[in-house]
């Protein structure tokens, strides 16, 4: 049976500014939901509310029908990739991987042409792209039912972006994934469903032309 994550009735304001007004979103095992939207539309805020790291005036976060107020406190439920670096800078890649994964997963995880040869290197010696790749791969390989990825392709070389797309697709066989990124082409390439955060709500997107209808893109920008 696929796992199901439902987000409902989310309301979030900052001072007098209402960011999210009435959200409904459903993600199941096998889904890769591409969440698009302009800066300040509330994409990152929504991901943090789903994860449980920030509060909101109202929300209902349900996994397989059970309500969770702060999902991140329950092991194996939701993994979250923030936009900012989060790994401990003084640890090596090998030590970091051991913190996140079971012992039998460590060596297979490090059989990787992008980071494998760097496994003795400290996190603070990695390039921004190398660290981002490691962070994404770690989050994707955690034993969570759902994964939230905020700007996973930002600052990553194009050839590595293609590796990440393959990895995301592979992991979606056992997980539900919601991701957001400003490069809508990469989002459209990897996602199986799409939505647009606009005017405080989530609007389903059936095809790229819908992004023109909602003034996210112009017709000339469609490839």
Image (cartoon, rainbow, N blue to C red):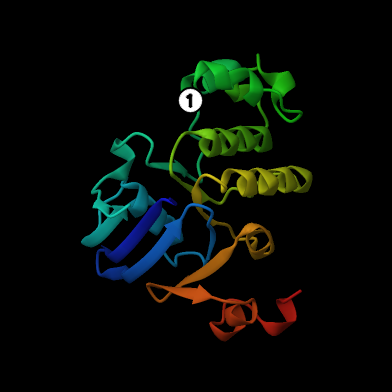
Q: Work out whether residue 92 can be spotted.
A: no
Q: Residue at x 33, y 53 (%)?
A: 49
Residue position for label 1? 100
Expressed as whole percent of the image width and height from the top left, the position of residue 198 reads: 45, 74
Give how far across and how far down residue 4 sits, in percent: 39, 55
Instruction: Say above or below: 221 vs 78.
Output: below
Quadrant where the C terminus lies? bottom right
Q: Is residue 113 left or right of residue 171?
A: right
Please name the residue shown 56% across and 48% down the image: 172
Residue that appears at 52% across and 44% down:
174
When the figure is inspected, residue 174 is found, relative to residue 120, above or below; the finding is below
Query: SS for tag 1?
Result: helix
Between 38 and 160, the one lying in front of the other is 160
Front-lying residue, 162 or 57? 162
Q: Residue furthest front?
A: 1
In the rendered view, would you say 65 is above or below 108?
below
């Amino acid at each position: 049976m696929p796992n199901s994550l439902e987000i409902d009735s989310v309301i979030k304001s900052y001072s007098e500014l209402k960011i999210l007004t009435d959200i409904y979103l459903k993600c199941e095992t096998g889904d890769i939901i591409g969440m698009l939207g302009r800066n300040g539309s509330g994409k990152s805020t929504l991901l943090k509310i789903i994860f449980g790291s920030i509060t909101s005036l109202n929300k209902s976060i349900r996994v397989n029908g059970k309500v969770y107020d702060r999902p991140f406190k329950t092991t194996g439920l939701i993994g979250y990739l923030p936009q900012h670096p989060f790994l401990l800078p003084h640890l090596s890649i090998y030590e970091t991987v051991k913190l996140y994964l079971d012992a039998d997963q460590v060596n297979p995880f490090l059989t990787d042409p992008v980071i494998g040869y760097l496994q003795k290197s400290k996190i603070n010696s990695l390039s921004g792209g190398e660290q981002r790749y490691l962070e994404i791969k770690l989050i994707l390989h955690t034993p969570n039912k759902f994964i939230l990825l905020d700007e996973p392709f930002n600052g990553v070389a194009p050839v590595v972006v293609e590796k990440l797309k393959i990895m995301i697709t592979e992991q979606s066989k056992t997980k539900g994934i919601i991701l957001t990124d400003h490069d809508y082409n990469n989002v459209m390439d990897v996602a199986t469903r799409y939505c647009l955060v606009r005017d405080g709500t989530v609007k389903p997107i059936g095809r790229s032309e819908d992004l023109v209808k909602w003034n996210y893109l112009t017709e000339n920008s469609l490839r």
